[in-house]
Image (cartoon, rainbow, N blue to C red):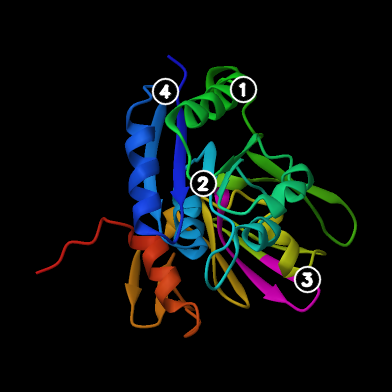
Amino acid sequence: MKTLNCLIIDDEPLARKGLQKYAEQIDFLELKGLCKNAMQANTILKEQAIDLLFLDIEMPMLSGIDFLKSRIDNPAVIFTTAYPKYALAGYQFDVIDYLLKPIAFDKFLQAANKALRLLPDKKDAVAEPNYIFVKTDKQLVKLNIDDILYIEGMQNYVLIHTLNEKIMALVPMKSVLEMLNSMDFLQIHKSYIIAKSKVEAIVGNQVIINQQYLPISTRMRKEVLAALTGNRLLKK
């Protein structure tokens, strides 16, 4: 049976609990997390494939709308809000539905069914190609994504490190993550993007990849460690 992996994002505990109860009653919804703010959701989206967000709009730090604006790619969205004034934003972001609080179960079910109908079946989805083309001085070079160890930023260039070679590419650092799967790659410093699966160890404020020590930005350390370890951290 077709299923949708979903997240509930709401700063109000009672609202989260109520939506959780609704989601657990619907067999095709797989609830992957309850988030009290957009930053928690952002972390989960880096680690898991999510199909659908039940997203509140007015939240501290980062509103639901600003959260959507901050991301390059987003899952499908159902707004859950107490404020009808944001209805126009729903059209801007092509959201599946707009639920006004207090939300009745029949309205929630109707919106979920609409998402099920509109979203493609994962089995029918076309697999993303596992390569990219990068522009060097004289040519476009085809590069297997699985071969990438890490990427080093050098002003308007990047140096792509693989097991067998280094490729200097004419692309700014800020564009690299847009080409790569952000679930597999992680920016750990303004000058470094790493393949998460290639990390051998974390030592202080550095990661080790292929015997190379790469710095973790102090500002990004907490987010980087969370993304690399997830819940797979064995403690004493």
Q: Measuring 66% from the left and 63% from the top, which residue is drawn there? A: 66
Q: Would you name the residue on which mark 2 appears? A: 101
Question: Residue placed farthest to the top in the image?
Answer: 1
Q: Is residue 225 magenta?
A: no
The amino acid marked with disc number 1 is: Pro
Decide which of tag 4 and tag 3 comes sooner along the chain: 4
Decide which of tag 3 and tag 1 comes sooner along the chain: 1
Q: In the rendered view, would you say 136 is above or below 154?
A: above
Between 92 and 110, the one lying in front of the other is 110
The amino acid marked with disc number 2 is: Lys
Q: Nearer the viewer, mark 1 or mark 2?
A: 2
Tell me the quarter of the picture where residue 7 sits.
top left
Q: Measuring 39% from the left and 62% from the top, which residue is drawn there? A: 228
Task: Provide residue 183's location: percent of width, then percent of height.
Answer: 52, 50
Location of the C terminus (image quadrant): bottom left
Q: Would you name the residue on which mark 1 appears? A: 120
The amino acid marked with disc number 4 is: Phe
Q: Would you name the residue on which mark 4 appears? A: 28
Q: How crowded is mark 2: few (under 14 residues within 10 Å), some or many (20 or more)?
A: few
User: Regarding mark 2 in the picture, which secondary structure is present there?
Assistant: loop
Which labelled disc corresponds to residue 10? none
